[in-house]
Amino acid sequence: MSRMKLPESVFTDFSDSIGPMVVKELRQGLRARSFTWAFLFVQLLLLIFMVGGFVESSDSRDTAGSFWFLLQVALLVVMPLRGLNALNVEVKLNTMELISLTRMSAWRITVGKWLALMSQSVLLAIAVLPYIVLRYFFGGMNVVAELVLLLVVIGLSGLVTALMVGLSVVSNFLIRCFFTVPVLILVFRFLGESVYRVSRGDGVAPFNLEWEAWLCIVPAAIFLGCYLLDMAASRIAPEAVNYVTRRRIAALCCFGASLVLSHFWAVPAALLLSFSFLGLFAIDALSEHPPTVSSVYEPFRRLPGGRILETFFAPGWCSGTWFIFLLSALMAVAALLSPQAWISSDLDSAGMSIAMILSVTASLMLPLAIMLLSRPTHPEPVVSYCLTGIFLVTIAVSMMPFVERGDLPGLIQLVVLLPPLSIFAIFRESVGSHEPLMFSVVQVLVLLFSVAVVLWKNLRVRRAMAQARREDLSV
Amino acid sequence: MNPPPLPTIDPSPVPAIRVDGLCRQFGQIRAVDGLSFSIAKGQVAGFIGANGAGKTTTMRILATLEYPTSGVAEIMGINVMDYPAKVREMLGWMPDNFGTYDNMTVIEYLDFFARALGYRGKERRERVEEVMEFTELDKLHDRLINKLSKGMGQRLCLGRALIHDPQVLILDEPAAGLDPKARVELRQLIRILAQEGKTILISSHILSELGEMCDTLVFINAGRVVHHGTAESMKRHGMETAVVNVALVGDPAKLEEWALLSPQVTFLQSTKNGGRIEIGDSSPEVVSNVLRRMVLDGLAVTEFRREERNLEDAFIEMVGKLDREAGGK
């Protein structure tokens, strides 16, 4: 029997050098209604705005606002939000397992998803270039500034898309909203300001930053995008595959770099990044069950000093705890070495800086302790960890007015027990100069409690593993 | 109808599938409880058990999709936990339900998996064409996969599992929800694969089909192996007596008279040419001894046919017995 002739185009429409996931996602994505409608809608509205704008005025600045508003909504909101289901939909459809059985690593799957979404965003951006040319033709337009803005918007779109793809492994709607809404608020703030500036003819929007700040922001954005994608990859990878170690090493380097920057150049952005990153690293490191597969630990045992490395860099919440302590300790050292660049610029003393760092660390550790005590075997520990964290932050926010008033001296004793609220109290300077020691002592107690829970639970995990190992040996 | 497949058993000592002391605990529930069995290379093994017996969990562990709490699972001598990537190269997995993608045609689906499995250029095209021809999906190459019938979907799923030409196939309920025609077609595909020497572990609730297709059956209950052997041995499992249909030349009443005088033999029922007798011991030696005595005693036996239970009956009886035992405890 002769073989039926199959269409050539299916085998040649995408080169072999393009990743399989990108090919699949592009084939699906370019046919998806959300993309075709977004594409047509943007084109149609731009056409209407352009024609309407030029009929009323010959100056392209009048059309710039609507042009950039529309483009940015498409690139920074609509397209990234499509990534919010990128990995979760594969899990729900039972197709993730089939993909993971191929030679594709979880990293390639995740990056493929992101690249496909970005390709569609870039396609959308390229499709509006004729309108930029048209506006240039009518005059009153700063071409270089607007092209730079376009690049910045595409870059930002990449970062927001990475965040959405990263979040797409989390099945809980509340957690997704909790992280998505603030990002969208920031995006709309950027969008509003850039549209305002570009319509005034200022060109590139809120970019009147110092070069040192750019030195922090650009690499940090690239690092953050990669980190979020790697974090998502880690959650869909088999237990035997360790993505955590490389991510923690990268996190340590990034954290160290931001501390060095803040020390030598006193860049406030570096300081802010350090704190933000600490939160992200904690969510990552503390919300992951320790693997039960022995092969994950073997590479550490082969290395000299491997046991120490395993303590900080092996996957799981136990080593995650020590890793977060390591980062906090680095932060404390930096605070003592360069108080002028650090928190003490806002606070009264180095002691208060230490109290602040302890409060932040305790805020990150307490949800883990509660999670391990309440739902230690939750299939999605990140959900359990984040929900506990959100609960604690909600309590803290609801108690803020009392701290703000400061007319309840007895309450301060209660306040400091709740680490997220103590951060707020320290920032608002709602405590007297004699309080740092008390703050520190209470936060240390919270930390000791958390560590005790972690060690106890870790002991149980180790025992279970040892038991399984004994059973294996007896087999 | 095609003749039953000839098993092509590789004599090498490493089994294609080996499971030893496998346990999998989900909270308080022990889905797999010390399961042990092995399947030789080239064998087609049926994996049977009631719902919740631990079949799918075991198959998922073998397919590197689940981790055991303890115990060993190996494919071609390679531990599935420690070297999942190596195992995946040798394994084709077909789940009981596979999700469909929106906006993707049959050929694009297979092309994607061929790309993902590392095939490039001409080789990729050949693999896709070969699989489409084998599964007879070539006529439906431009059909969107969410528009396929259940039977065609199962063919596509099997095709995907075969893209990298794996040595071991694990098929979880491949015939579930298929109409009789689609079931027969799927069975034929599996037969061809078996003739090619692939090791196949297949679970199904249609036991008669498994009996025809498989060289060996692994029956599990509550996460443990209850019986491991051929379909024939399973049919006879737990049978203490053997019922035999006997036909004679001459007066059928002679059989009843002979049975009255013979130890271990009870006459059950007269038939046109003879009757049905029950032998008190079902072992082949005793049964053959009864036949020899009949002939020696001058009965002109023209037919001596042992009645077999079908697999469904044997399965239900075994499950019932296990349930009664569990209830007794």
Image (spheres, rainbow, N blue to C red):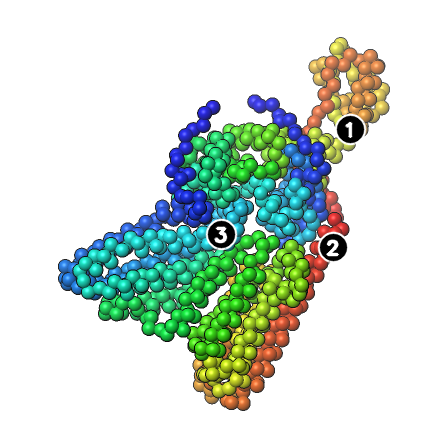
Chain of the residue under label 3: A
Whether residue A77 is visible: no
Q: Judge left or right: residue A6 versus residue B207.
A: left
Tags 3 and 1 on a common chain: no
Q: Which residue is mark 1?
A: B282
Q: Identify residue type, mark 3.
A: Arg
Relative image position of residue A412 (x, y in whole percent): 52, 84
Mark 1: few, some, or many residues within 10 Å (few <14, many ≥20)? some
Is A157 drawn above or below residue B39 in the view shown?
below
User: Which chain does the numbered disc 1 sit on?
Assistant: B
Relative image position of residue A271 (x, y in whole percent): 46, 75
Which sits earlier in the primary sequence, circle 2 or circle 3? 3
Q: Nearer the viewer, residue A246 or B158?
A: A246
Which residue appears farthest toward the top when viewing the image?
B250
- Res. B74 mark: none
Asked if the residue at tag 2 contacts the one at tag 1, i.e. Cβ–Cβ closer than 8 Å, the answer is: no
Q: Is residue A279 above or below residue A422?
A: above
Q: CA distance from mark 3 to mark 1?
A: 60 Å
Which kind of residue does numbered mark 2 sit on? Arg
Residue identifier under label 2: A470
Callout 2: SS: helix
Gap in angstroms between the C-alphas marked 1 and 2:
42 Å
Parent chain of label 2: A
Residue A108's mark?
A: 3
Residue sitting at x 59%, y 82%: A441
Mark 2 crowd level (few <14, some 14–19, many ≥20, 10 Å Cα): few
Residue ID at (64%, 42%): B75
